[in-house]
Image (cartoon, rainbow, N blue to C red):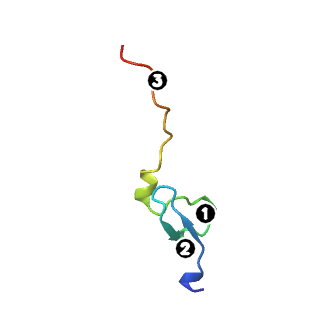
């Protein structure tokens, strides 16, 4: 199989494309991040902005 024929996804953190790796063979459907750094910096749930003025 050529490298260009490997499946690819887009990283949810940095939006860069990345390709299948052998170490991800069993968990490819669960892979969301292109690297450990992006996994650590994953987008957290943002709380809505606080309403109200100064106390």
Disc 1 from disc 3: Cα separation: 42 Å
Residue located beneath label 1 in the image: 27
| Lower sequence index among marks 2 and 1 | 2
Residue located beneath label 3 in the image: 51
User: In the displayed image of the protein, which residue is found farthest to the bottom?
Assistant: 2
Q: Residue 16, image x and y in percent?
A: 47, 65
Q: Crowding at label 2, few (<14), some or many (≥20) Cα neighbours within 10 Å?
A: few
| Lower sequence index among marks 3 and 2 | 2
The answer to whether residue 39 is left or right of residue 22 is: left
Q: Crowding at label 1, few (<14), some or many (≥20) Cα neighbours within 10 Å?
A: few
| Residue 35 location, quadrant | bottom left
Element type at mark 3: loop
Q: Crowding at label 3, few (<14), some or many (≥20) Cα neighbours within 10 Å?
A: few
Q: In which quadrant of the rendered image does the C terminus lie?
A: top left
Q: Residue 27, image x and y in percent?
A: 60, 63
Q: Of the numbered discs in the image, which one, if any, rests on residue 22?
A: 2
Q: Residue at x 60, y 73 (%)?
A: 7
Asked if residue 25 is positioned above or below residue 51 in the image, the reply reads below
Element type at mark 2: helix
Disc 2 from disc 1: Cα separation: 10 Å
Q: Residue at x 56, y 60 (%)?
A: 31
């Amino acid at each position: 199989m050529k490298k260009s024929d490997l499946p690819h996804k887009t990283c949810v953190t940095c939006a860069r494309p990345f390709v299948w790796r052998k170490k991800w063979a069993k968990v490819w459907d669960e892979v969301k991040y292109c690297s450990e750094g992006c996994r650590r910096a994953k987008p957290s749930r943002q709380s809505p902005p606080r309403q109200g003025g100064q106390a």
